[in-house]
Image (spheres, grey):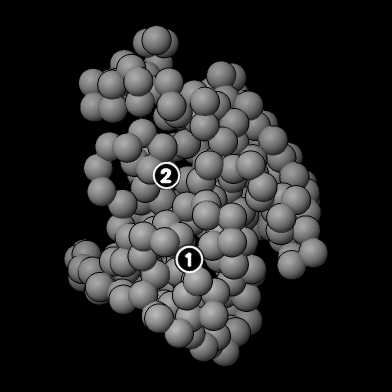
Amino acid sequence: MSERYSRQISIIGEEGQKKLRNSKVVVTGIGGLGSVASYYLAAAGVGYLRIIDYDVVEISNLNRQILHWTNDIGRPKVESAAMKLSLLNPETRIDPINEKISEDNVDELLKGMDVIIDGQDNLRTRMIINEFAVRSCRPYVYGAVYGMEGFLMTIIPGAGPCLRCLYPYEPKIKDFIPVLGTTPGVIGCLEATEAIKIITGVGKPSVGRLIIYDGENMSFHEVCIARNSQCYVCKKI
């Protein structure tokens, strides 16, 4: 095993590292959450990392989207991120896809992945991803941020609630979401941690538990989320 991973092998073992090397993870959005999650997944030695985004780098992204730098402004985010991730760990195959996730292409974009990581900024697209995750029985790590608050829940179809159980009704979409740059840093790290745990079998994922991070008061707490027996997305799983 590579010396690159020696510190984590003492935790997950050589077998766990082999599982990471043979795994396929997709990060659905390479902004604040996705930048951090993909960085730590590549650093951990995930063998295949697909990153999906359709946007270009803007100056307002730079307070939180750590894979994008000033000289990347105007560049497609997947190109900017792929370059940094490849330099970070040449052992990880980076597959950048410059496309917007929709109901028409979600199956093609996400099929064959072992874990799906949420890097989105809107609930509508998250619900499309959630429905794919449920019907394909793929783990989906949900993360979201607002201001100095962050939220995390891991969805493993059949083992706990899905995202529609958590949000039975979609809230009104806001045009502007305030974010302190460190907030997606915290949640993105947690998302990567959940993915590593799922792949290696080490630890207990946050299934049925919504983890809430309060940066203003520096606290974490959790809310138990029950599976909705009437949920039209996951009730048959």
Q: Nearer the viewer, residue 175 or 47?
A: 47
- Specify whether residue 105 is in view: yes
Along the polypeptide, which appears first: circle 1 or circle 2? 2
Left or right: residue 19 versus residue 56 is: left
- Residue 188, percent across and down? 43, 52
Q: Residues within 10 Å of mark 2 (few under 14, many from 20)?
A: many
Quarter of the image for residue 187 reads bottom left
Q: Nearer the viewer, residue 65 or 193?
A: 193
- Residue drawn 51% across the image and 88% down it: 169
User: What amino acid type should be assigned to the residue bearing mark 1?
Assistant: Ile
- Residue 228, percent across and down? 39, 80
- Specify whether residue 214 is in view: no
> Which structural element holds mark 1?
loop
Quarter of the image for residue 174 reads bottom right
Q: Residues within 10 Å of mark 1 (few under 14, many from 20)?
A: few
Q: Nearer the viewer, residue 146 or 130?
A: 130
> Which structural element holds mark 2?
helix
Q: Which mark is residue 237?
A: 1
